[in-house]
Image (tube, grey):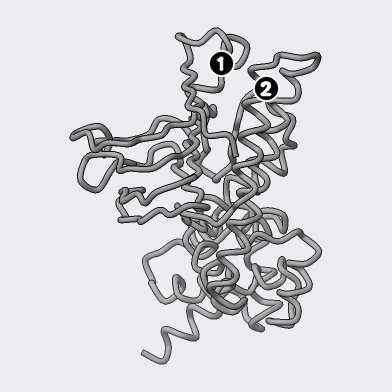
Amino acid sequence: MPQSQFILQQGLSKELELFPHISEFGLRKNNTIQLNSFIVSQSDNLQIYFIIDGKFDWIINHQHQVLYPGDTALVLPGQVVGGSKGYLGIGAYFWLHLQVKKIDANGKLIPGEWSNLSSGDCQAIGKILLLNNLPVLKVKEVAGILQEMRMEITSQELGYITRVNHIIDSLLIIIARHSTRQAISRRDFPQTFLKLEQTLRQNLAHQWTVEEMAAMVGLCSTAFTEKVKNYTGFSPLHYLINIRVSEAVKLLKREKVNITDIALETGFYSSQHFSTTFKKLTGHTPGEYRKSNNSYK
C-alpha cells in the first residue's frame, strides 16, 4: 500500500469543494509522541479509521480500545474518541470524517442527498451500527476502498464525483455487514434474539415492522423470519403480539392503570383491538382478566 501522507480538510482543500459531506480525509504517519495531540472529545460526525501500522491506545465511546494493523475503528456521531493518554500514538492510519445529517430516534442513518443508499438500507445500517456497538472491526477491505477513494479524488477523471460517493456508500455497507458478522460470531441466535426481545419490550408502543426487527439482528427479512419461526414457532409479527400481550398482563395487575392506556402503551391501535387480541390469546377480555386476577388477592 502507498505510504505517502496526505491530509484533506473541508474549507482548506480544494479537492473537497464538491464533497461538502467529507469533513476530513487523510493518511497520517505519526513518528513521534506529541502530548495533547488527541484529547478525548465528542464527535459531531461519523469517523472511520483504518490502522496501517503501529499500535494505538484509544478511548472510543467511553471504552478503552487497543488498535492494531488491519483494525477498522468506527466512531458514531455523539460518541467520544481520543487517545487514552491524550495523544495519538506512533504508527500510520487512514481516516475519514463523514458528515451525516443524523441518526434519528429510530436508529435510521440519514447520510444526505449525496448518497444513493435506499431508505431501507439506511434504516438497517443505522440500527446495526447502533445496536451492535462494535467500535473496532476486522475489515481489511477498508484499506483498498480508501485508497481507491483517494485516487478518484486526486485524479478527478470523468465521473469521479459519482464514483467517490458510490465508494462511500459501499464502505458503509461493508462496515455494517462486518459488524453483523462479528456480532453474530460472538453470540448464537438465542442470545441475539434475547437482546432483540429486550429492545422490543422497551418500546412496544412503536409499530415495529419485520424489516426493522430483522435489521436489528443484521439479517434480511426472509432469513430473520425463518430463524424466528424455528426458534419460537411463530412468525415475527405473531411473536411480537405475544410479547405485547405478556406485557399487558403485567400492567393489568396494576388496578389504577387505565385499560386504554395499557392498550396504547403495549402497541395496540385501540382498546377494541387490544380486547379482541387479548381474548383470542388468553380466553378473557382485559377487563375479565383484571377482575379474575384481583379476585384471588
- Picture residue at 41% right of the left edge, 64% below the top: 257
Question: In terms of sequence position, does the residue under pointer 1 or pointer 2 come before the other?
Answer: 1
Q: Residue 182 got which mark?
A: none
What separation in Å lies between label 1 and label 2 (alpha carbons)?
A: 9 Å
Q: Is residue 53 left or right of residue 238?
A: left
Q: Residue 20 got which mark?
A: 1
**Image location of residue 137, percent across then percent down:** 52, 55
Q: Residue furthest bottom?
A: 296
Q: Is residue 289 left or right of residue 207?
A: left
**Image location of residue 81, percent across then percent down:** 34, 41
Image position of 252 with respect to 137: above or below: below
Q: Secondary structure at mark 1?
A: loop
Label 2, residues with CA under 10 Å away: few <14, some 14-19, many ≥20: some
Q: Residue 114 got which mark?
A: 2
Amino acid type, callout 1: Pro
Amino acid type, callout 2: Trp
